[in-house]
Image (cartoon, helix red, strand yellow):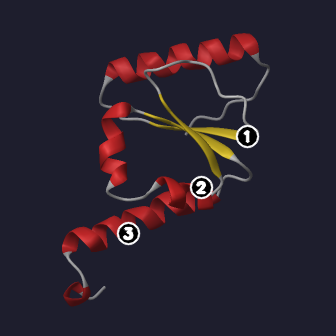
């Protein structure tokens, strides 16, 4: 990469966007992102809602707000969380337990 053509922040932002988009594109079909609210501002530096839609993201939720999943057609739910905060992990567990109680769906956690 040529630093002269852009700031270091821009270059890092574009590199992180490529990583995110490659990960999203590896998941077939429409998907929902459930965000750790503490990470949303950081991801706003990397991507926009419109760009996420181009990678088949049909809805975005905050983990704090509700364990329910919107009634939009989707094949996958992608959780983007900070693992350094145990309360976020506990919220994820509660969310998955709720989803399991109302649906019979296979979950893959990575």
Which quadrant of the structure image shows residue 52?
bottom right
Crowd class of label 1 (few under 14; some 14 to 19; many from 20; radius 10 Å):
some
Taking the image as shown, residue 49 lies to the left or right of residue 103, namely left
The disc, 3 or 2, on the residue closer to the chain's N-terminal end is 3
7 versus 95 height, above or below = below
In this view, the mark in front (1 or 3)? 1
Q: Which mark is residue 15?
A: 3
What residue does disc 2 label?
53
107 versus 55 height, above or below = above
Element type where label 1 sits in the image: loop
Q: Nearer the viewer, residue 108 or 91?
A: 91
Element type where label 3 sits in the image: helix
21 versus 33 height, above or below = below
Please report the residue visible at 61 percent of the width from the left and 59 percent of the height from the top: 55
What residue does disc 1 label?
74
| Residue 84 seen in the figure | yes
In this view, the mark in front (3 or 2)? 2
Q: Nearer the viewer, residue 57 or 16?
A: 57
Residue 18 position, x and y percent, is 46, 67
Please report the residue visible at 24 percent of the width from the left and 81 percent of the height from the top: 6
């Amino acid at each position: 990469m040529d630093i002269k053509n852009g700031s270091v922040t821009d270059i890092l932002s574009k590199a992180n966007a490529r990583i995110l988009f490659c990960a999203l594109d590896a998941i077939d079909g429409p998907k929902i992102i459930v965000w750790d609210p503490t990470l949303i501002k950081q991801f706003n530096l990397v991507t926009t809602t419109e760009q996420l839609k181009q990678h088949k993201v049909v809805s975005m939720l905050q983990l704090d707000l509700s364990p329910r999943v919107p009634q939009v057609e989707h094949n996958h739910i992608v959780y983007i969380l900070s693992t350094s905060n145990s309360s976020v992990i506990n919220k994820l567990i509660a969310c998955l337990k709720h989803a399991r109680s109302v649906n019979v769906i296979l979950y893959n956690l990575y």
